[in-house]
Image (cartoon, grey):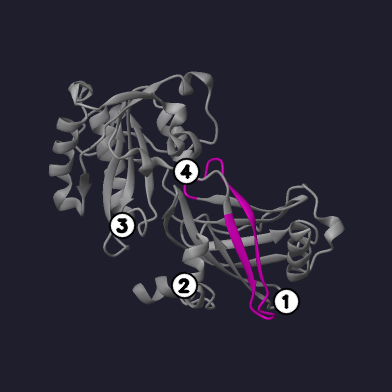
């Protein structure tokens, strides 16, 4: 009964008839410019052009061979962190020394099926990591709670992959204050605690209609946009299936369409950091009729209640286009 009322409220907020909330896929708004989307990075130090290319494109699927592999977990993994490019050489040296075959001799270290590691099995970057057949590395923003970065790199060697993933992450942190980059997986070695690899399959999402003040909470599912690293589709789900589709781009733009009516909203989004392996996002969207919606993805209930005034404030960041112009 409660879920039925929630579905009805969402239908009213978004201006769509409940009978039209079917599982048919909504068509996302076409954003004119794909922005600065990175598909490859080049690690330094390699003279062979073939070895310089690091494939870092996320994946959405895995095959059975990817899932039969095992990874080594340690009870007290080393923290391999680079705060900037100046500290990168030391971090790379530490990584080479820490993630070797001798690590399995460490007391308490154990081999675990990769399919049991949520972040590897569930996230697109984790799936790309598991699919690596030679060198591979996975790097996250540090701290993860406030640095929403996850970079994967595949290369002929683990050293090259580590270099590539760390450099990609450091490029991203250049605009994020107080963020560094931590190597969390390399080759067959996990370099963070088991709990750091948690991954929530589904997350809660809240839609706030600024005109009426109506707040609606429902489920959402995130998927990669094939061939578009950094771009994501987030399906808005009610009891009957998908209601709408939110698309977020790595340059800060966002767009949403509603299944039943085709109504479109465009605006911007901000990623706040990871919550159980999923990025918490805020999107500020305006419809063609001038109606403003706030979409909050992935925030825990307690966090939402404690920061309700801040999270429900309208568009505190301004236009990303204007911000880029001001920066120049």
Q: Quadrant of residue 207?
A: bottom right
Q: Quadrant of residue 194?
A: top left
Q: Is residue 183 left or right of residue 6?
A: left
Q: Say which residue appears at 52% left-offset and 50% top-offset.
A: 231
Boundaries of the magenta span? 204-230
**Of the image marks 3 and 1, the number of the one nearer the N terminus:** 3
Q: Is residue 18 left or right of residue 140?
A: right
Q: Which residue position is annotated with label 1?
A: 289
Mark 4 to mark 2: distance in Å?
23 Å
Q: Regarding mark 2 in the picture, which secondary structure is present there?
A: loop
**Of the image marks 1 and 2, the number of the one nearer the N terminus:** 1
Q: Is residue 97 magenta?
A: no
Looking at the picture, does residue 34 appear above or below residue 51?
below
Mark 3 to mark 2: distance in Å?
25 Å
Q: Regarding mark 3 in the picture, which secondary structure is present there?
A: helix
> x, y (%) of residue 62?
52, 28
Q: Residue furthest bottom?
A: 211
Q: Which residue position is annotated with label 2?
A: 307
**Of the image marks 1 and 4, the number of the one nearer the N terminus:** 4
Q: Which residue position is annotated with label 3?
A: 173
Q: Regarding mark 4 in the picture, which secondary structure is present there?
A: loop
Mark 3 to mark 4: distance in Å?
22 Å
Q: Say which residue appears at 50% left-offset and 60% top-offset.
A: 281
Q: Is residue 215 magenta?
A: yes
Q: Is residue 262 left or right of residue 299?
A: right
Q: Regarding mark 1 in the picture, which secondary structure is present there?
A: loop
């Amino acid at each position: 009964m409660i879920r039925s009322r929630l579905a009805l409220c969402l239908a009213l907020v978004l201006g769509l008839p409940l009978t039209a909330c079917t599982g048919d896929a909504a068509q996302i708004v076409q954003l004119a410019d794909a922005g600065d989307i990175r598909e490859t990075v080049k690690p330094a130090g390699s003279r062979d052009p073939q070895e310089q290319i690091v494939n870092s494109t996320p994946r959405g699927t895995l095959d059975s061979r990817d899932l039969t592999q095992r990874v080594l977990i340690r009870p007290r993994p080393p923290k391999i962190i680079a705060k900037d490019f100046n500290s990168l050489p030391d971090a790379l040296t530490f990584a080479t020394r820490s993630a070797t075959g001798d690590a399995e001799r460490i007391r308490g270290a154990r081999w675990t099926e990769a399919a049991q590691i949520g972040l590897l099995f569930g996230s697109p970057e984790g799936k790309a990591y598991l699919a690596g057949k030679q060198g591979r590395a996975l790097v996250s923003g540090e701290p993860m709670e406030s640095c929403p970065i996850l970079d994967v790199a595949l290369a002929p060697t683990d050293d090259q992959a580590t270099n590539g993933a760390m450099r990609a992450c450091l490029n991203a942190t250049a605009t994020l204050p107080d963020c560094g980059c931590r190597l969390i997986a390399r080759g067959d070695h996990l370099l963070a605690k088991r709990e750091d690899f948690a991954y929530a399959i589904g997350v809660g999402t809240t839609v706030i209609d600024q005109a009426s003040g109506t707040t609606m909470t429902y489920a959402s599912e995130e998927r990669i946009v094939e061939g578009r690293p950094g771009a994501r589709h987030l399906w808005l789900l009610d009891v009957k299936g998908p209601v709408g589709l939110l698309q977020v781009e790595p340059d800060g733009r966002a767009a949403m369409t509603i299944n039943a009516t085709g109504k479109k909203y465009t605006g911007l989004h901000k990623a706040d950091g990871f919550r159980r392996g999923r990025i918490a996002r805020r999107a500020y969207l305006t419809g063609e009729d001038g109606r403003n919606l706030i979409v909050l993805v992935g925030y825990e209930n307690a966090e939402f209640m404690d920061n309700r005034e801040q999270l429900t404030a309208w568009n505190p960041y301004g236009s990303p286009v204007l911000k880029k112009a001001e920066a120049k």
